[in-house]
Amino acid sequence: MPVAFDKFVDWAEKHFGPIEVRGNEICVNSIFTDDKKKKLWCNPFGGRNKVRYGVYHCWKTDKKGTLLNLVMQLEKCGRDRALDILGCEKETLLVPDDIDFSFDINSPKKELDLGFKQKELVLPPFTYPINVAPTCWHERASEYLQERSLPTKDFFICTGGKYEGRVIIPYYDAAGRLVYFNGRSITGNSLRYRGPEKEIGVGKEDVVYFPKYPNAGDTLFLCEGEFDAYALFLCGYKACACGGKFLSEKQAVILSGFKMIVSLDADEAGTSSLSIMHNRIIQYNQFASADIVQPPKQVKDWNEFYKQYGAEIIKGYVSSNTRRFTI
């Protein structure tokens, strides 16, 4: 780890006074605002993107950057001295001395010029974990998810820009890298869902949502929506979502190493799509078969089922109603 946690804590106490440690986060009074109240959060581990030399974020002013630059500014010292304060090895060619002090935590990491550019997907600007978002957005996003009996810990809220007022649902691959995100409007926007811009080069049909990435050979419940998959995940099942009633070839390939249970909504459209979905799965799946189960018709989908009846009822229902697909 480039930054020594204990060394940074000692340094922070000298410069900011009393600090508060919350897991990997060190909360201190911000130097960027008169409204102190521990608005400056520092993460020596680099946050969700594991940024080299750690990251800081002032929640009052939205100032962000690396801990390396924070130390250089406050100590008025060079890079080598700052690395020593942070307990880092003095590395070369990795990070230049003149990184912009307003470095965005969400921006792609700077790398050596190898003759090509590699795109890296990041969450939209002004996107925060719901539990640490500005109060008004924290409350709105929390209420929205609570109405669906879903926790907030694995979702984000965007408070500005093109995705303002959307709960951000992240998609990760097996290595934990962000490969896609879906923004669900909580403000009545006519466009309910919004993914990354087309220039990124990845669309809904290229990815599968997993609340937690499964192991090869696991049994997966294939749902339409992310919240349906997450509801089944809360019931103890391994689940995923393809984003609708159609499974693309790329999605089928991603799911080819898992035992599948097709779990579309119980509406007419979901029922009529079972055959097409089942055939697409077994066309690519190494297990060459798939079971099916749908929620009861009196509920809209799995999330609604979970909200109304809870995990134990769902587990009993799934156990009794999962069956082989027959035309």
Image (cartoon, rainbow, N blue to C red):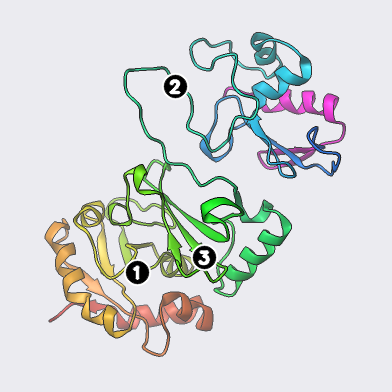
Q: Quadrant of the C terminus?
A: bottom left
In the drawing, what numbered circle is on residue 185?
3
Residue 53 % position (x, y): 60, 24
Q: Would you say residue 24 sits in the magenta stretch?
A: yes
Residue 21 % position (x, y): 75, 40
Q: Is residue 85 rendered to the left or right of residue 323?
A: right
Pick the front one: 6 or 197: 197
Residue for badge 2: 111
Q: Is residue 126 rendered to the left or right of residue 286?
A: right
In the drawing, what numbered circle is on residue 224?
1
Residue type marked 3: Ser
Residue type marked 1: Glu
Quadrant in the picture for residue 5:
top right
> In the current view of this chain or complex, which residue is farthest to the bottom?
298
Q: Is residue 240 rendered to the left or right of residue 233?
A: left
Q: Would you say residue 248 sits in the magenta stretch?
A: no
Number of callouts: 3
What residue range appears in magenta?
A: 1-28
Pick the front one: 210 or 319: 210
Q: Is residue 108 rendered to the left or right of residue 204?
A: right
Residue 124 % position (x, y): 51, 47
Q: Earlier in the sequence, mark 2 or mark 3?
A: 2
